[in-house]
Image: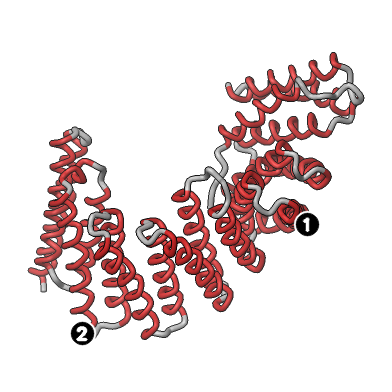
Amino acid sequence: MTRINFGIAALEIFGHLLILEESAYGIHMTRRLKDSALRLVGKAANEVDKDRFEKAFENLAKAEKIAEKVKDPEISYHILVLKGFAKYKMGDLEETLEFFREGLKISSELFSGEPENEDYQRFIKNSIGGIAEGLSDLEDSEEAEEYINRIKGMLDEVVRTFEGLLNTQPENPEFLEKFLEVIDHLELCFEIGKLTEDLIPLLEKKIGLVERLLGSESKTDTSELLCGLDDSVMTVGRVGSEDGYFEEIIRCYEQAMKLYEKILEKDPGNSDALQYLSYTWSYLGNLQIILDDEDKVLEYYKKSVDILENALKDYPENYPLSMVLANMYRILGNVYSEIGETPEAEEKARANYSRSRGIFLELLDKYPEFWDIDEHFAMFFDELAGEFSELGDLEASEACYKDEIQVYEKLKENKGELEGSTYEFLVSNIYRKLGDLFGSECEK
């Protein structure tokens, strides 16, 4: 679920202030008053950017007097949101949330009256995004829940207004994209507010919006769309499962899988759709762990692996899928390790871990440039070493730790990614783990 970038949002708002200078405000305020208000807000924005908050609020107070005099809601909105940004930077979350709540009230009224107005859509997105960001940093969960319940009516009205707008222009990519951005922020608000009952239908709306966007003339990157959707499917699935909404979450998983399958009907080699289809089967398998259905757990995780194995038969050079497959074998190994301590389960866990390591080593052999990417492979081998260790397979664990050392050596050698002191620290830490590994065995 996407968190708002306050810097980017502020730039959007301040850029919009410049556009307002060319708007027709004559019937509401004189040119002189309008210019004065905009100039003051612009100055305040610069002061906030430089952390000169006292001066910023002095300018905003003057601008606020003008806004009250001319009764212009757009100017009032900008003042409130800028106050919210300032208070956020000052660390005053309660004031931040109050200013954004007031900004939401104005922006929702403007949006409801003229939903096709792109500026008002942006106002809504920034208001809800600011609220989501503030709530994310709020440590008092009860206060966060109370706050969300206070503004819930306005949030619901925003959703209804967007749906009404899309009823009139169902394939408008700009409207679809904006609604999707707003849903990203709403998901975070509802998760923090523990409104799982509302979070689930919001995910279903999101799945539908993504499908419509993929069928429209939208220029939004497909990979970005599907990545965002998978993030929501995973998060809402986790939250819903924890709260006992099992049937509803299964329904959401199935809807997401149908979307991925539709994409694959048109584009069988689509890496993103294959990856997220595989992931969703694994989410379904994880849900069965909660439901204590061991057979379905294994069935769904194996399905997750089979999707990738079959795809790689047709597209063997698709290395991103190979990386996903390696990780999925590791997860399947974890499943076998957790469901029982029988010799058979342990052997299957070991076999899946070994398959996982083998795929990664094949990739590194086939694509030497992968050594230069980052520390991802090192962390992978480190985790795998720990998992082998838990099974009592010290030899395999040792091999994984040595793989990890090799990754760090290559990073240092090829790109100088690791400074000497950092490299020495990381490698010495691995040798310490190796010492602990065999030291524990000697004590037995």
Q: Mark 2 Cα within 10 Å, few/some/many (few <14, many 20+)?
A: few
Q: Looking at the image, which is closer to me, 230 or 272?
A: 272
Q: Where is residue 280, by image quadrant?
A: bottom left
Q: Looking at the image, which is closer to me, 268 or 35?
A: 268
Q: Residue at x 23, y 67 (%)?
A: 387
Residue 430 position, x and y percent, is: 16, 52
- Left or right: 292 as drawn, with respect to 384: right
Compared with residue 107, is residue 330 higher up or lower down, i.e. above or below?
Answer: below
Question: Can you tell which mark lies on residue 344?
Answer: 2
Q: Secondary structure at mark 2?
A: helix
Question: Can you tell which mark lies on residue 153?
Answer: 1
Residue 328 position, x and y percent, is: 30, 66
Q: Looking at the image, which is closer to me, 260 or 404?
A: 260
Residue 325 position, x and y percent, is: 28, 63
Q: Looking at the image, which is closer to me, 212 or 9?
A: 212
Give me the C-alpha separation between circle 1 and circle 2.
55 Å
Does residue 135 show up? no
Q: Residue at x 41, y 85 (%)?
A: 293
